[in-house]
Amino acid sequence: MSDGARFPLVVTFLVVAAAAALCARGLQRSRDQEEGGRRECGYAATPYRWWILAAAVAAAAVGATLAPAAWQRTVLLDAAALASFGMVWSDTATRDRWAARLFLQLLVLSIVAVAAGEYALSAGAAVRRGWLVVGLFALGYGLKLALVPFYVWLPAVAAAASPLTTVFIVSVVDIAALGELARLRSDASWVFADFRAAWLAMAGLSMLGGSLLALAQRDVKRMLAFSTIDDMGYLLVGIVAGPGAGLAGVVAGGIAHSLSKMLLFGGVALAEAGLRQPVSLDDTRGLAARFPISSAAFVAGALVAIGMPPTLGFAGRSQLYLAGFALGGPWLLGAMMTATALAVLYYARAIHRVWLGVPDPRPGVEPRAAGVSLVVLIAAVVALGAIPGLLLAFV
Amino acid sequence: MVMLPIAVLFAGVVAQLALGGALSRAAKGWLAFATCLAAFGGALFLVPAVFGAPAGVERTFRVAGTPVAAAYRLDGLGLLFLLMATGIGSAILLYSVRYMEREPRGTTRFYALMLAFVGGLSNLACAADLLMLYASWEVVGLCSYFLVGFWYTDEAASRGARKVLLMTHLPGYALLAGILALHARTGSFLWTDPAVPAAFGTGVFLLMLSAAMAKSVIFPLHTWIPEAMQAPTPVSALLHSACYVKAGVYLIARLYSLGPWHPSWNTLVVTLGCITMVAGALAALVQTDLKRLLAYSTISQLGHIVTALGLGTGIGVAAGLFYCASHGFFKATLFLCAGAVQHATGTRDLRQLGGLAARMPWTTMAWLVASSAIVGVPLTNGFVAKWMLFGAALDGAWIPVVVVAWLVSVFTAFYMVRATVAVFYAPEPAAGMSRAVHEAPLSMRVGTWSLALGCLVFGVAPQPLLSLVGRTALVPLGFAEPVRVSWFGVQLPVGQVQVTAGALVVAAVALAAVTLYALRRRPEPARVLVFTGGDPIAAGDATVNASDFSAIAEAAFAPVSAALDPDPLYRAGVRGVERAALAVQRTAAVFAEQPLEATLIAAAVLFGVLWLV
C-alpha cells in the first residue's frame, strides 16, 4: 500500500470514531434525561470505561496505520483489537459474556498466528516452508477479518454488543488490519502470488457464504455482521490482485466499508435505543416515519455497501470488479456480482421490512448530535462518490 | 458548453436541498420548473453546434492538479435525448407545481429527485466514458426507486419501489460486466475509442442488451412497470415518457456506435420487440385501472420502438428514434391527463369514472389528441412514427413485423377507445360524482397542453424532429441519411409520404366536415345495426359502445395475458435463493454450536490443503 493511502485511512478512522462517539453521547444524554441514567446499553452504564476504550481503539488504529516499523504496527494493531475486546466485555450483559470470551480466545489465536507468520517470514522460512507461512497468515488475518471459515466470532459479538461497539470493530480495527495485510502484499508478494487459489477460495467463500448467511438472518445486527464478512471477501480479492486496481479498490473499498458500516450500525443504534428492543425483520415495521435520519442513514449505508453510484461504494467496488476481472476473468467477476446481487436482496428486504411501510404511531426521538453526525456522513459518501478522483488521488 | 444543461440541473438539485426549508411548496415547484426550463434552453443552445459537427462535440473536463476528469461527447443521438428529457421534464414540472401543492411533506425531496432524474438521463446521453454512463444509468434507477416509493408509508408504494429496484438494478450488473469486458480488451472506458468496434462482440452485446431490456420494459423483464404506478402522477409521466424507459432505448441505439451488428442480433432484438408489443397490448386490454392501462401500453409502445431500432437500417433506426420522441409527447400527455382525472375525482378506476368530458373539457381534448397519436391517427406524430415503422419493415422485407405491428395497432385502438369512453363519455357512475369535480388548474393544463401540442405540431410538420434524427443522430450510429425531409414532409424510400401536404388536406377536409355539421340541424339519435364480431347483444340493448367490445376482448385475452406473465418464475427464483440461504445456515450451524472446535478443524484443513498444494 502506498504511503499516500495512509492519510485517507487515518481520516476515515477519526471520522468514524467521532461519529460513533457523537451517536453514543447523544443516546446517553437522551437516556439520562428520560430515566436518570438507568442502564439500557453498555456505553450508557459504564461511560468512562467505554469512552476510554473507544479512544484507545481509535488511537491504536491510527498509530498502526502511521507507524513505520512492522513490529510497531503489529503491536498497535493487537492493542486496538484487545481494546475492542474490552469494549465488547464492558457492554455485554452477563448472559452474553460468552460472545466476548469467544472473541478473546480467537483474537489471541489470531495474534499468535500472525506473529508466528511474521517470525517465520523474517527467519527465511519462505523457501522451504512457504505453505506454513501462508497458512499462519491466512489463519491470523482470516480470524482478524472474520473471513470464512474463521468468521464465527463476528455474528456472536454483533448480536451481543451494542451497535456502536461493533462499529469500532468492523470499521476501525478490521480496516486497520486490512491495511496491514495490504502492506504484506507489497512486502512479500509471493505469499499471495504463489498461493493465489487458496486466497481466492477464501475470498469467494466469504463473499458468497457471507451474503447467503446474511440473507438467512432475521436479526438486523447479525445480518450486518454477515454483510461485513461478505465485504471482506471483496477486499481480499483486491489484495490478491495487488498493485493497480486491486490495491486502489482495497483503499477506496475499505473506506467505503468503514463509512457504510458506521451509517448502518449507527442507524440501527438510534432505532434500538428508541425502541428499547433489537431491530428485527420479524417484528419491527415502518421505522422511517419515527426515525427518519436513522432510516436515511441505513438506506445510504446499504447503497454504499452494494456499490451503488453515485456513492463512495461505487468508487471502491468498480476498482475491485476491474481487479477481479483481470485476476479471475468472467468467473470471478460473475461470483463477485452474484454476491452483490444477494446483498441487494438482503438490504432491500431489510429496508422494506424494517424501515418503510405503515408506521408505528408512537413518536421516535433521534438525538440531535447523533442525527447531525449521520447526515454529515451521508453527505460525505455521496460527495466522495460523485467525485471519486479526490479519494483515488491518494492511492 | 456541453455540460451547461447538466450543470444547471444539478445546481437545481443543490438549490432545492439548500433552500427547501425556506420556500413554500409552490415556490419549490416553480424553482424546479425554472431550472429544468433553463436546462432545456441550454440544450437548445447546443443544437447549432451539433448540426455543425454530426460526429459529435467532444469535451473532457479536468480539475487541475487532480485525476478528476469527465469525458463527454454530445452528438445528434445524445442531443435528441437531452432535448427530450429537459423539454418534456419542464412541462411535467410545470404540471407538478399545483399537483404537489396539496402534499403535506416531502416536496423538497420530490423536486430534488425529479431534477436529479432528468439530470441523470442528460448525463447518460452526453457521457463518452462508459463508467460514467453506468453511473448515470444507476442514478436514473435510484431516483426512480425513491420517487416510486415517495409515499413510503404506503405498503403498495413501498412494494412497488422494491420491485423497481430489484428488477432494474440487478440486470444493470450486466451492463457493468459488458463495460468491464470492453475495458479488458481495449484498455479504455471511452466508447469513442477507435479500438472499441473490434472488441465489441456477441457477449458484450448480449450483456448490454439485457440491461437495456430491464430499463426499457422489454419482455420478459417488463413486469415492474405496472407496480411503479404507485408513484405520484408526474413521476409516472416522467418515468414513462422521457427519462426512465428511454434510457434503455438510448443504450440500444448507442450500441450501433460501438460497432457493426451481426444480423442475428437484429433478429433477436426485433423478435423481443414484437413479443413485447403483443404482451403489453394484451395486458392493457384487461386493465381497469387507468394508470396501469397506460403502463401496459408503454410496454407495447416500447416494443414498437425497439423493433424499429432492431431493423438495422437507417430508416428503421430513424423510425425508432422518431417513435421514441413521439412516445414521449403522447405518453406524458396521457399520464398528465390521467393525473388530472385522479386529482379531480380521487380515483383512477375505469368502472367508477364517466362523464368527465363535460366537466373537464380541456383535459378531455388533450386526452383525445394524445390517444389519437398513440393509435396512429393522421395529423398526429404517432401516425408519422407508425408510417415510418411500417415503411422500414416493408423496406427490409420484415413482413411478420408488419403483421404483428398492425395487429397490435388494432389492440391499441381497442383499449384506448375503451379508456376514452369509460372516463370521458360513459354515463356518470350510479353513485354520482361529487360536484367538486372540475377542470384541472391552469398550470396543470398548460403543462399538459404544451405536450399535446407537440403531438399535433410534429404530426403536421415532423421536419424539425426528422432533421435532427436524420441529419445528426444517425451519423454517429454509422448510417447514411435515410430520409429526405422536404418542406412538404418526409419522403421515405418506400412509398412517398408527403406528411405536411397530406396533413393539410386532411385538416381541410375535417374542417369542412365540422363546418357542415355545425350548419346542419343536429340529427336525432337513431337505432342502427352494428357489427359486433358475432357476439350477441343483450335483448333491448339498442346501442353498442366500446365497453361491449372490451368485454369480449377481456374474456378472450385474459388467459393469454396471464400466460405471458413471467412473475411466477421470478418469485420461484427468489424462493429458491432463500431456501439455499437457509440450507447454508443449517450447514454453518456447527460453527455457532462448537465455535472453537470448528475453527481449529477449519485451520487444520487449511494447513493440510496448503501443504498438499
Image: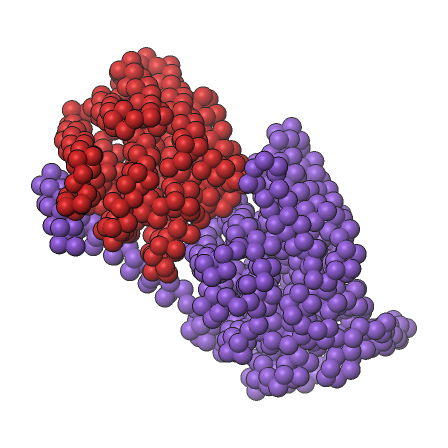
Chain colours: A red, B purple
| Residue A164 in sight in this render | no
Picture coordinates of residue A73, whole percent (x, y): 28, 27
Residue at image position (56%, 56%) is B190
Q: In this view, does B551 lie above or below A215?
A: below
Quadrant containing the C terminus of chain A is: top left
Q: How many labels does the image show?
A: 0
Q: Which residue is drawn at 33% across and 21% down?
A: A59
Give above or below for B48 relative to B314.
above
Q: Quadrant of residue A302?
A: top left
**Where's residue B410, x and y in %?**
62, 78
Q: Quadrant of residue A258?
A: top left
Question: Which residue: 37% across, 21% down?
Answer: A21
In this view of the protein, which residue sits in the foreground, B256 or B565? B256
Is residue B43 shown to the viewer in this render? yes
Q: Is residue B543 above or below residue B212?
A: below
Please indicate whether residue A87 sits to the left or right of residue A372 in the image.
left
